[in-house]
Image (cartoon, helix red, strand yellow):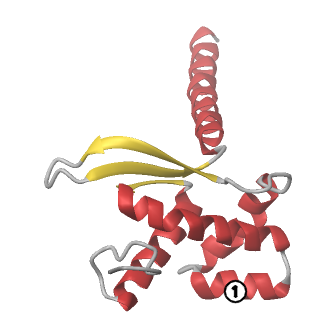
């Protein structure tokens, strides 16, 4: 019987499971959107939300706790400088899991784990790219006309 043994084992020993989850959380914070299996996304979600809550505290102790868990210093900086201020007025629920079908190789359920608001950032990036592409065309036309 598995009474009081909550949480997914992910088919790994405890050290490997911890490393996998640390890598997933670091990647979500750095990239704001990752594609992984549904079980891994469900296992990583509470840890990502805990890291964002640490970022909202923004104390030296919270920074050290986050730095001890996250794999890269860049992820820690992004957490405290960009992500935590975005969710300052939100009480929880910083992530979303979107079901994305099945993996081709083994048929595992695939999901997208993303931070809320990341779709707005992607839209802003696309708009910036469009403006950059349009601006050189205008200057080329001006040069050709001159």
Q: Secondary structure at mark 1?
A: helix
- Asked whether, in this view, residue 99 is left or right of residue 146, the answer is left
- Asked whether, in this view, residue 83 is left or right of residue 18, the answer is right
Residue drawn at x 35%, y 77% is: 9
Q: Residues within 10 Å of mark 1 (few under 14, many from 20)?
A: some
> Measured along the vertical axis of the image, is residue 37 above or below residue 13?
above
Q: Quadrant of the C terminus?
A: top right
Residue drawn at x 56%, y 28% is: 133
Residue drawn at x 52%, y 69% is: 25
Residue 60: image location, x then y, percent: 83, 86
> Measured along the vertical axis of the image, is residue 88 above or below residue 141?
below
In this rendering, does residue 145 appear at all? yes
Residue 103: image location, x then y, percent: 22, 49
- Asked whether, in this view, residue 7 is left or right of residue 109, the answer is right
> Measured along the vertical axis of the image, is residue 37 above or below residue 68?
above
Residue 7: image location, x then y, percent: 45, 73
State the residue lying farthest toward the top: 145
Q: Would you identify the image quadrant in which residue 117 lies?
A: top right
Residue nearest the viewer, comparing 1 with 98: 1
Q: Would you identify the image quadrant in which residue 11 lies?
A: bottom left
Q: In this figure, which residue is indicated by the disc labeled 1? A: 65
Residue 144: image location, x then y, percent: 56, 13
Q: Quadrant of the N terminus?
A: bottom left
In this rendering, does residue 27 appear at all? no
- Asked whether, in this view, residue 35 is left or right of residue 88, the answer is left
> Measured along the vertical axis of the image, is residue 142 above or below residue 133?
above
Residue drawn at x 46%, y 60% is: 42
């Amino acid at each position: 019987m598995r009474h009081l043994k909550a949480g997914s084992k992910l088919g790994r020993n405890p050290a490997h499971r911890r490393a996998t989850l640390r890598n997933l959380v670091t990647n979500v914070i750095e990239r704001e959107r990752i594609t992984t299996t549904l079980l891994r996304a469900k296992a990583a979600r509470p840890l990502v939300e805990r890291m964002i809550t640490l970022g909202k505290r923004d104390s030296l102790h919270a920074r050290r706790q986050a730095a001890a868990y996250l794999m890269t210093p860049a992820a820690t900086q992004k957490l405290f400088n960009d992500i935590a201020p975005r969710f300052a007025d939100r009480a929880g629920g910083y992530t979303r899991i979107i079901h994305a079908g099945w993996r081709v190789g083994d048929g595992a359920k695939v999901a997208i784990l993303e931070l809320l608001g990341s779709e707005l950032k992607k839209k802003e990036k696309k708009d910036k790219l469009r403006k950059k592409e349009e601006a050189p065309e205008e200057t080329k036309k001006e040069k050709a006309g001159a």
